[in-house]
Amino acid sequence: MLRFVARRLLMTAVVILGVTVLTFFLMHLAPGDPAEMVAIARYGAENLTREQIEVIRKVEGLDAPLHVQYAKWLYHVIRGDFGRSLSTGEPVLEEILLRFPATLKLAFAAMIVSLLIAIPVGVASAVKQYSLVDYLGMAGALIGVCVPHFWLGLLLILLFSVHLGLLPVCGYGGLRHLALPALTLGSATAAVTARLTRSSMLEALSQDYIITARAKGLPERVVVARHALRNAFIPVVTMIGLQFGHLLEGAVVVESIFAWPGVGKLLVDAIFDRDFALIQGCVILFALVFVAINLVVDILYVLLDPRIRYEGEARP
């Protein structure tokens, strides 16, 4: 087990290093002068002077070759120093940690919404295969997959906030502020999980041990809940873990729509300001969370299915 975890941690480090390289150089290949964008963010476009731009370029080290800037930045990151925001001057790590709880809160709420919808729909569709319940459930899942976050978010705002006046349009607060962003973010993952749950349940229900359980006279709810659902849940757990990473990615759009003060909105604002230090910090955070989730999912997968060995070999 320790060798498995150590190997995965090494792969994680390689992935993170690749993310830093891609993020750093792609941002600097984007059109526009970064020093000028930073100067506009600090002083405003109306009062901007060429001297201010040159001072920022020199102070922030933007006049050095790209590989030198990258090496210097990576050296500080390894030591836990992500630098300072080019637009606000505040430490990047402090700004991210200040916003991260709001993003986690939204992601967990969206995951709960997703599971509350997906698991019952997927199980009911499998148990009632080719029935009206099955058709309605899978039609809803198909719509959920196809509808983009920003479009669904705007529809929910129009319905629940503008027309019915039940929920606030945007902002950060309690459950009333969290409801619409969580529903928007959780709908797409619910659709994917429901379809996977249905297919996994159908495969499990066709196995011999299910036929044996039914032949013994066990009630159908016991057969479904105790025997079929447990085995069908293995690929679903994998998908749920991966989807949590996608929820963090989707938060970038949803937080912007609902003015949710999380890391996603911080990243969007940093992109508009060409704040390289803040963008790189946010991207590294998302990458770290994503690979950490993958590692946890892999370990859970092994624990749930004892037939799988850490090296990927079947037990004799």
Image (cartoon, rainbow, N blue to C red):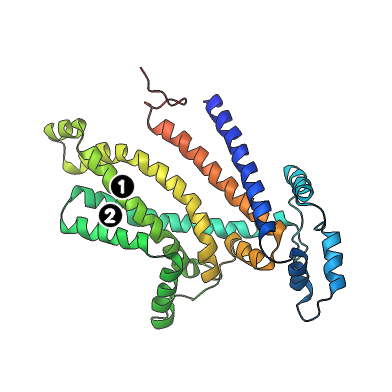
Residue 187 to residue 284: above or below: below
At label 2, counting other C-alpha atoms closer than 10 Å, the crowd grade (few under 14, some 14-19, many 20 or more) is many
> Which quarter of the figure has residue 103?
bottom right
State the quadrant of the C terminus.
top left
List x then y, in percent, for residue 301.
Answer: 42, 35
Image point (21%, 39%), residue name: 205
Assign a secondary structure to mark 1. helix
Horizontally, residue 141 falls left or right of residue 276, namely left
Q: Of all residues shown, which one is farthest toward the top?
A: 316
Image point (41%, 69%), residue name: 152
Q: Nearer the viewer, residue 151 or 97?
A: 151
Going by the numbered disc 1, the residue's amino acid type is Thr
Horizontally, residue 94 falls left or right of residue 143, namely right
Dots 2, 1 in contact, CB < 8 A: yes
Residue 101 seen: yes
Image point (58%, 61%), residue name: 264
Compute the Cα span from label 2 to label 1: 8 Å
Q: In the rendered image, which residue does mark 1 sit on?
A: 197
Going by the numbered disc 2, the residue's amino acid type is Val
> Which quarter of the figure has residue 226?
top left
At label 1, counting other C-alpha atoms closer than 10 Å, the crowd grade (few under 14, some 14-19, many 20 or more) is many
Q: In the rendered image, which residue does mark 2 sit on?
A: 121
